[in-house]
Structures are given as structure tokens and as C-alpha cells.
Image: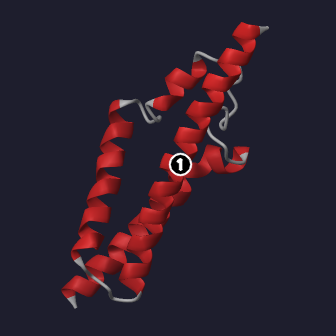
């Protein structure tokens, strides 16, 4: 029983870390969109865009998944889309499509603001 509790605790901590990282990037993506909409194009917008690009590179080198996912997989047999993060299953499943679309919209608005 102690091993099960230990694994559950490790999985909880991984899911918590993954969720906090996810929330950070959601805020960054939201910031990019808002900065574009309100024409607030400070250096932070470019840093935010770069952070999301860097996140994309990390995901690319990990076959499209977070580096925490295979670590979480060691502590559970569950393979639902949200087994490694505290999100509703449908959000975890569609996460990349939803937030990549918002990010692209934000970047498009920022680029439009810069060019006009």
C-alpha cells in the first residue's frame, strides 16, 4: 500500500507541475492576443511569442507531448488525454488545436499592428 501511495503522490506532483506550466503558457498566449488587440506592442510581446515558439520546439522534440508525460506514465496505467494534467479530458485532448489557434490569431494581429 505504501508503494501505491508513493506513486499517487508522485503522479499528483507531476500533474500539478504540468498544470502550472500549462496555465503559464495559457496566460502568455492570452497576453499576446490582448497585446495585439489593444496595440500594446512592448518588448514583452516578442518575448512571449518567443517563449511559445520555444515551447513548440520542446514539444516537437518530444514527439508532440510534454516532457512530463512519459514521467507521469510511469506512475499510472491510465492513458486518458488528461492522465498527466489537471484539465477536463476534452481540453487536454484538444489543447494544441485550441491554443495554437489562439496563438496564431494573436501573432497575426501583432504582425498586422506592426505593419500598419
Q: Is residue 96 left or right of residue 104?
A: right
Q: Is residue 101 left or right of residue 93?
A: left
At x 29%, y 48%, the residue is 54
**Based on the displayed image, in which of its 4 quarters is residue 11 positioned?**
top right
Q: x and y percent of residue 91 in the render? A: 66, 51
Label count reads 1
At x 40%, y 66%, the residue is 104
At x 33%, y 88%, the residue is 39
Residue 84 appears in the picture as rendered: no
Q: x and y percent of residue 69 in the render? A: 52, 29
**Based on the displayed image, in which of its 4 quarters is residue 58 positioned?**
top left
Residue 107 appears in the picture as rendered: yes
Point out the image quarter for the N terminus. top right
Residue found at the far right of this picture: 1
Residue on which the image places disc 1: 20
Q: Is residue 115 above or below residue 25?
A: below
At x 44%, y 36%, the residue is 64
Point out the image quarter for the C terminus. bottom left
Q: Is residue 35 left or right of residue 115?
A: right
Q: Is residue 22 above or below residue 3?
A: below
Q: Is residue 73 above or below residue 81?
A: above
Q: How is the image coloured?
A: secondary structure
Q: x and y percent of residue 26 in the render? A: 50, 60
- The crowd level at tag 1 (other Cα within 10 Å; few <14, some 14-19, many 20+) is some
Q: Secondary structure at mark 1?
A: helix
Q: x and y percent of residue 17 in the render? A: 53, 40
102, 24: nearer the viewer: 24
Q: Is residue 82 above or below residue 105?
A: above
Amino acid at each position: 500500500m505504501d508503494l501505491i501511495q508513493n506513486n499517487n503522490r508522485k503522479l499528483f506532483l507531476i500533474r500539478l507541475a504540468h498544470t502550472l506550466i500549462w496555465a503559464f503558457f495559457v496566460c502568455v498566449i492570452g497576453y499576446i492576443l490582448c497585446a495585439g488587440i489593444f496595440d500594446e506592442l512592448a518588448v514583452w510581446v516578442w518575448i512571449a511569442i518567443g517563449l511559445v515558439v520555444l515551447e513548440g520546439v520542446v514539444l516537437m522534440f518530444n514527439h508532440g507531448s510534454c516532457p512530463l508525460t512519459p514521467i507521469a506514465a510511469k506512475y499510472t496505467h491510465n492513458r486518458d488525454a488528461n492522465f498527466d494534467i489537471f484539465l477536463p479530458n476534452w481540453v487536454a485532448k484538444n489543447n494544441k488545436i485550441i491554443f495554437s489557434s489562439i496563438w496564431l490569431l494573436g501573432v497575426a494581429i501583432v504582425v498586422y499592428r506592426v505593419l500598419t
